[in-house]
Image (cartoon, grey):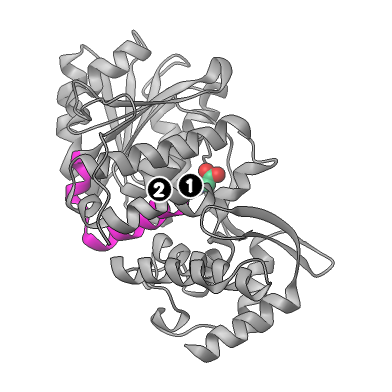
Amino acid sequence: MTPTPVPPASATAAAGTADDPVRVPVALGDRSYDILIGAGLIGAAGGLIAGVLPKARVCVVTDATVAGRHLDALDASLAEAGISASAVIIPPGEGSKSFDVLEQVVDQVIGGRFERGDAVVALGGGVVGDLSGFAAGIVRRGMRFVQVPTSLLAQVDSSVGGKTGINVSHGKNLVGVFHQPDLVLADTDVLDTLSERHFRAGYAEVAKYGLIDDAPFFAWLEDNWPAVFAGGPARTHAIATSCRSKAAIVARDEKETGDRALLNLGHTFGHALEAATAYSDRLVHGEAIAIGMVLAHDFSVRMNLMGPEDAARVRRHFDAVGLPTRLDQVPGGLPDAGGLLALIAQDKKVSRGALTFILTRGIGQSFIAKDVPGEAVKSFLADELAAG
Ligand code: GLY
């Protein structure tokens, strides 16, 4: 297959640099904001934040790993812009999305005498963004908030759209608020510091946007994924396209009463796999949803919604990039089909044995299916487990 040429970094042909970042607006009325995407943006963050939030003081929330890599550069940029700043450093990992760590962050923000007009700045991946966004949403009934996402997953998904929260013993993300940021700064250079495993896992969320409703983008990724992994204009294009897709969905359904649920493609199966592996390093989120998206397509074939060709394409593409696509690739084994269905039912609303899933009629043709029979899911999973 002849690769399609790499398009310019954005429709507006911005260079994707700190001086000329790609701008993706999120249109939410008086809560609208921009996502800026470019190499070296952390070095320009001070001026960009001052432009959006003049006179705001800044409380940076980050984790110990990200602090070691990027906090000095952010601090220097804030100081250069004359912004008074302090930092709260939390332990890395999902365990920090807890009431305990939330209390510590809230305590330090209030103790630092930050006001409503001041900003919490999340420097990190999804955990830091979700936790500090929640803190920003509740301290003084809502402070200003800036996201500086440092993982691919956070740049294309969790930093955009205002979902914030923590985990509790009943499950993930069950306590939180919608609190939109005032600005998102996605510095593409920081992705070079990610492990290949974590970059690849974030890539699953990039591919998801093609699978939801943008078949040409999925086809572009099939041809150009090595360039996306290598960096440069193809990577910027993939991030910008993903952010545009998410911005469009969030703009039409901010609080997930309808279309926003499409962003959960692959997540119903994926969350069950994450729960079955105790949210451990056995399977990181992007890997779980890669398998989940393959299963969602295969299950759609089983439900006679589509032919097998597109489902095979999805599996082939994820195999090619090195993402897991089969249940037997989950290290340490899995519960049986009944056990997996119980985990799915725990995660999702169940109504008289029927489940809500994101299913599809083909690549780029996903839809919300509200009455999926639990028994059909169980027998599908039994066959998938037996097939390996
Ligand atoms: N990550 C899914 C959403 O933002 O709705």
Task: Give the quadrant of residue 63.
Answer: top left
Measured from the top left, where is residue 68 in percent x and y?
17, 44
Q: Check the image and name the residue furthest to the bottom.
A: 386
The three-letter amino acid code for the residue at tag 1 is Asp
Measured from the top left, where is residue 187 in percent x and y?
24, 35
**Gap in angstroms between the C-alphas marked 1 and 2:** 5 Å
Measured from the top left, where is residue 94 in percent x and y?
41, 56
Q: Is residue 272 visible?
A: no
- Residue 8's label in the rendered image is none
Residue carrying label 2: 217
* Residue nearest the viewer, comparing 19 with 174: 19
The three-letter amino acid code for the residue at tag 2 is Phe
Q: Residues within 10 Å of mark 2 (few under 14, many from 20)?
A: many
Q: Residues within 10 Å of mark 1 (few under 14, many from 20)?
A: some
Residue carrying label 1: 214
Q: Is residue 83 left or right of residue 115?
A: left
> Magenta residues, as a range?
189-208
Q: Is residue 151 above or below residue 318?
A: above
Q: Is residue 180 above or below residue 274?
A: above
